[in-house]
Image (cartoon, helix red, strand yellow):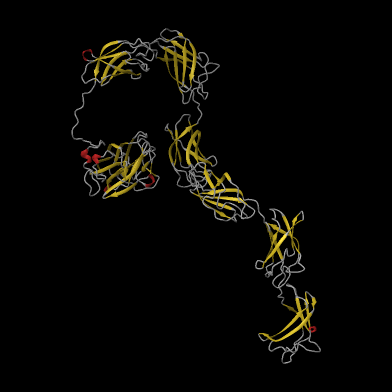
Amino acid sequence: MPGGDLNSHSTPSSTAFAVFVNDEPKAISSVDVIERWFNGYGLVTLYLDRPVAGGDTVTISYTKPKTGAVLQDTAGNAAANFSNQSVDNATRPAPVFISATVNGTELVLTYSKQSNLDEAALDGSAGFSVVSSPAGTAIAVNSARVNAATKTITLTLGRTVADGETVTVNYTKPGSGHVVQDKAGNDAANLSGERVTNLTDSTAPVFSSATVDRASLVLTYTERNSLDGAPLAGSAGFAVSSDTGPPITVTSASVDAKAKTVTLTLSRAVANGEAVTVNYTKPGSGNVVQDKDGNAAANLNGERVTNLTPDTTAPVFSSATVDGTQLVLTYTERNDLNGAPLAGSAGFTVRSDTGTPITVSSARVDAAAKTVTLTLDHAVANGETVTVSYTKPGSGNVVQDKKGNDAADFGKQSVTNLTPDSTAPVFSSATVDHASLVLTYTERNELNGAALDGSAGFAVVSHTTGKSIPVTSASVDAKSKTVTLTLGHAVADGEAVSVSYTKPGSGHVVQDKAGNDAADFRDQSVNNLTDSTAPVFSSAMVNGTHLVLSYTERNDLDGTPLDGSAGFAVSGAAGTAIPVSSVSVDAAAKTVTLTLGRAVANGEVLTVSYTKPTTPGHVVQDKAGNDAANFHDQSVNNLTPPPPPAPSHVASDADNDGVPNAQENQATGPAGVATGDGNADGIADSAQAAVGSINVTAVGGSSTSITLVADSQDGNVSPGNNDRITSLEQKDAPAESPQGLEMPIAQLRFEIELDTSGSSEKFSLYVDRETGVNGYWIKNNTDTWTNLASEPYGGKMATEDGRLRLDFSITDGGQFDMDGKADGVITAPGAAAYMPLSIVGLASDMAHTEFWL
């Protein structure tokens, strides 16, 4: 009672109080009164005959007794009656079963978390029983232990529960001993047939799929639980292969246990579209891919990997064809093109070798086929030569792939002409040689090679005799576009012949392979090649060991090799014989060359004779088989030069690099270097075949020195070098200089003989820094100018005490070698020049298409 102490000597009878639990009366065993308890309040304690359960609804009433002790304070003030006052029930509820799981031989029951369990040890099975369904077979419970904090009871079973086995658990509170209860002594209720979640896992993780994004490859596994998250060592048994690219090494592997994935870090990025496979062989030691229950994943062999690497490669022009008004460009692209509509010509231009302008009316994209089709304003004729160029438009849609990578510009690419042939073959000329008459036709493609019957409509007339010459057969050579007639008799040398053609009414006719028939013609003259005249000796000349005889012959000589001296004899002064070692024929030049056993001296008088051999072996004759006549003691014109004068004791070009010593000895090098050492290597330029120095004329007329070093290592000749400069000279600048390019020392042309054909050669070019040049510019085999002394092409510029060194590389037979042949010689006309812009794609203003890099 507030405001005073209770009278502990006035304790009412228990009948003065009424307690109801869940609306049911509860017997009161005794009453206790304490004068002062807390904050000036007295305390009345009622002792009930049995406990109130957690969650029960409790009310209390008090009626002052009419006799006997009443509830009052020490001053004698009696407490008032009250009825059905709610009582705060602080009693904890008994533990409530929540769930159960089993894994192997351990079955864990979880109880509600309102209070901790009583951790007193349980005996034996502690009232629990476990049943395997649906057979109803009991599984022995060997022991039960309590974890008070986690509010769990773990049963140790007599056997392992199988993966997938259905299990239920029962509990009957034991009649004696410890039971399942909380710390307050509230006993847990009995259980009957409670389902147990079976966590027993004997199934290994199964590979499901794999993806790769650049250098990260992720394998996903199917697994009921989690993977084992233990770290994997090295490649962890994984290997990755590419169908096209360089080898790939697995540098590390990591596990995401919950996501059930293994991520491999690769030694290089996988390219977009690259086909990749993954293998796995379980390591013999160390951690392996397994689930958290230790079930190891199976090996993998050649599993395909889905490539998610983004596409950063632009489409590349591959080829072009034209058929009439439709010109189709095909691009090489790993994915699809962007199918967005293109406007107008879309940056494409088409040109014909006929000079007739061709306008591109429209362009459309087939994304899946990776083609762009141009519609032209007029049809391209069969056989017409056409080229196509592309310049990316400054606005609007452009040719690109679906990832937005723009196709590069290109210039004057050839187009394969598929326009059908509608033009018939046209008779061009005819020749006859004995009984073989050959007609030649003009035709863009080939003739039809089908066999012709009989005379095939041809008639041949001799205007010398006035008689017809029978045609016994006709045959077609489709590729050479000729028809050969076999005549009934040979045409005589000099006989005048004409040929006519009338297309037969049936059977095969002369036509092209497209079926266009050749037109009829009449009395076309035939060039008579019949030859019955032997070659006639004309003259002879000698130079050293080679004596050349010339013959007069309407056609060619027979080029068949001749044996030994072939019947020729050569005599010197006083009739002394000079042996003939061998004889060769140049059929077209109509010459026979004798190789002599010794060289003929200048001024020596010779004669030559020929007697046709009677022994087996070829003779001098024309290709018609007419043998040359014998001749004797024909004079020979001696062209053997006098011996050269003795060499001077002073070499004018000691290193044989094409530059006189006097000029190289004037070379200007970096500051502080002796004159004549243009590359500052301490060796005179005139003593090095791979170093050449000349004076050139600069803009304004002043003279300046330049030095070229072949096989250069930062300006010095590489050790063991055998390369040689054979020519170094200044050339005029181009007549039409491209816009923006300044050539203060015009062009420099050099030629180098290499130690190894086809090799790539490094050069250094020293120029005066005052020239203001910023690169070495050269045009490649597609008319594109390129700065080779720039980083993208492996070159650079360096300054050495007032001199500027331009370093660059050129490959023998490559795009910057003027002759285009890997023949051991590099020929390069370039320019040390200044270009104010270094961007790619600045077009020149020259008449033909070229670009500056």
Q: Is residue 300 left or right of residue 147?
A: left
Q: Is residue 151 left or right of residue 340?
A: right
| Residue 32 percent across, percent down from the top left | 74, 84
User: Quadrant location of the N terminus?
Assistant: bottom right
Q: Is residue 149 left or right of residue 670?
A: right
Up-down relation of residue 235 to residue 426 (above or below): below
User: What is the number of callouts on the image?
Assistant: 0
As drawn, the residue found furthest toward the bottom would be: 75
| Residue 783 percent across, percent down from the top left | 38, 38
Up-down relation of residue 708 to residue 355 (above or below): below
Residue at 29% x, 44% y is 716
| Residue 342 percent across, percent down from the top left | 51, 43
Up-down relation of residue 76 to residue 399 (above or below): below
| Residue 279 percent across, percent down from the top left | 56, 45
- Front residue of this view, candidates 382 and 303: 303
- Front residue of this view, candidates 376 and 310: 310
User: Quadrant location of the C terminus?
Assistant: top left
